[in-house]
Image (tube, rainbow, N blue to C red):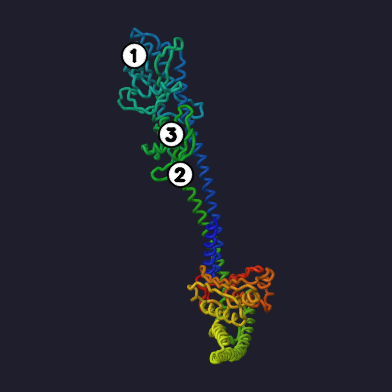
Amino acid sequence: MKDTLRFFKYILTFLYKLLSNFLYDLEIRKKLYTINIIITLVPVIILGTKLYLISNQNLVETEKSFLSSSVRQMRDIVDFYMEGVVNRSDILFSDRNMQRILSVKYNEYGDLLEMYTNFSQKVLPLLNEYKYSNLKYSSYSLKNGVGLFLTFYSNNNSINSIFMNNNYDNIRILNFKQLDGEQWYRRAKDSKSSFFWRPTYTENKYVQNSDTPIKVISLNRQFYNFDTMENLGVISLAIPLDSIGDILHSITPREGCSAILMDQEGSLVCSSGQLADGSEAFRTALNNIIQKGEKGVGHLKVNGADAGVYYETSVISGWKMVLVDSGNTVETKTNEIVVTTLTISLLSFAGSLLIMLTLSKTITKRLKHLTTKIHRIKKDTTLPLQEIRGNDEIGELDQQFNEMLGRINHLIETEYKVKLYSQKIEYELLQEQINPHLLYNSLTAIRWISKKCGNLDAYEITENLIGFYKASLSKGNIFIKVSDEIYIITAYINLIRKIYKLDLDYRIDVDENICSYNCIKLILQPVVENSLLHGLRNSEKKGLITVKGQKAENLLIFEVNDNGDGMEQETIDKIMSDSGKDRKSFGLYNVMKRINLFCGDEYGLSITSRPGMGTSVKIKIPCCDSDGNITGL
């Protein structure tokens, strides 16, 4: 998580710097244009986008509500007509005269003809008058006023033997045995409902003297004699499918929608509109949606485009009324909103830009005069100055510039005098450098005399002192190689050990790989001096001083350890503070300050010590080149 936040912070910082650099390089006029574009476009884009999203959401919700209501109304209308069929079947089912007529055994043809006449007179009004003017859906009529078709599958052999294959108006009486082997009848018997809706099938016997097939759906139920509970057969009331199709066409809410009626098996009964292509893939996709519940909303692909699916379950048949909407209405209305928003945005932006162009020209004209003046002064600071009129920020800036230029001229004159004085001081410093060289030459002469006279102690002391001074001078360089710094402390230890007759050993444990690196001159010698003179010189035990050095990443780390008297923490705190500039601890304080000065406050030295336990001084500096530039970063 922290790495992710750090990465985003880095990206934002980078973008901020990139934008800042871009704006810094632009002219004021272009900056004003840029600010105007941002100030104008950003709110317009935000408000326009918000308006679009809200409008689109409201449109979608409104359309969903409208189409859900539409499919519910369509279901109610179709249920109304199907309920009419159920009501007529109830009338036939409960009519005792019908039960009596169909139960009697007829032996004479005249009796059969009379029976059939009575049967037709009873049934035909129910079949043909399939419209009620006093009901709420009376405006939706069946095609050409055609009514229902009745087929009665009779168990009465005395009726079947004569009317087996006769057609009369909308009525047929067939042998009950014709239902044997019919799959739909087996499903009807397995159904727990008192009646069964048979999906689409084709019949060609309802219309006299015509072989033209007709597609129908039918309501089927068992017919009983209430007195004897004898099963008289099956009543089948069929509705022409064209009539249901006409209803769907008349109640489809708008173009771009398709109304579809699907049975409980997921087969398409009938439909209206062009979206219902009737393919297996379409039917499967639609079933995957409508099988999820009694009602709902879904989406599918129709001809490569998204379409909304709204469905309700019929209370009468259990079939699904489905409405598929292409969504063109929402898209059209949304496009109108987009066009309107873009038009208003562009007009607002154009007007704002025109105003800003006029204002920016007025503002930048005086700034241009000031810029021209500055360019002239760059060539010659002594040119006469022409003031820019006005007391606003630009006028004040011009006044301040004139005053600054006067001070600059004064500083130039002062700098020239200081330069002459600096050259004089530099000459004097060069003269003073003769003295260390004089001392070095004198020590060389003493060494030669000591050797000639056989005074080996004086010779060795002088030899170490010469080596120390030679390495310390280092041609006036501030930075020297680590190997030279090690030579300096070695010469110094040998010199002090000889002078004070100290009984001590020393070890130099410095990685050879860092000997070629550069470091600040004389950062180890003062530390070693402090260990020798203040830690080991007065110690009763044999002294040991160890100097270690190694490289860790881009750092050089040195450690000077001794087994001397050690010191209190109070003394350490005093050395590390400004109060450490006294005579005894000035060397350590000086090393710390020089490291801070050349390398930064994150580098320096640390001291660890306890009385009687010796002292350890750790020095941490960056890897540097010969000019003191930090490398490896």
The quadrant where residue 583 appears? bottom right
Q: Position of residue 392 (x, y in %)?
A: 64, 74
Disc 1 secondary structure class: helix
- What's the residue at 32%, 16% (across, down)? 164
Hey, what amino acid is under mark 3?
Leu
Vertical order, 270 against 581 (above or below): above
Task: Write down the residue under mark 2.
Answer: 327
Task: Place residue 578 in its image quadrant.
Answer: bottom right
Label 2 Cα crowd, 10 Å radius (few <14 / some 14-19 / many 20+): some
How many numbered discs sit on the rendered protein? 3
Q: Is 472 on the left or on the right of 86, as rendered?
A: right
Give the alpha-carbon distance from disc 2 to disc 1, as whole Å: 55 Å
Residue plotted at (52% across, 40% down): 65
CB-based contact (under 8 Å), mark 1 and mark 3 = no
Residue in the foreground of this view, choosing between 554 and 261 = 554
| Cα gap from disc 1 to disc 3, whole angstroms | 38 Å
Q: Work out whether mark 2 precedes mark 3 in sequence or the reverse, and give the earlier one.
A: 3
The percent position of residue 449, horizontal first and vertical second, equals: 55, 92
- For disc 3, the neighbor class at 10 Å (few under 14, some 14 to 19, many from 20) is many
| Location of residue 117 by image quarter | top left
Q: Which mark is residue 160?
A: 1
The amino acid sitting under disc 2 is: Gly
Residue 579: numbered disc: none
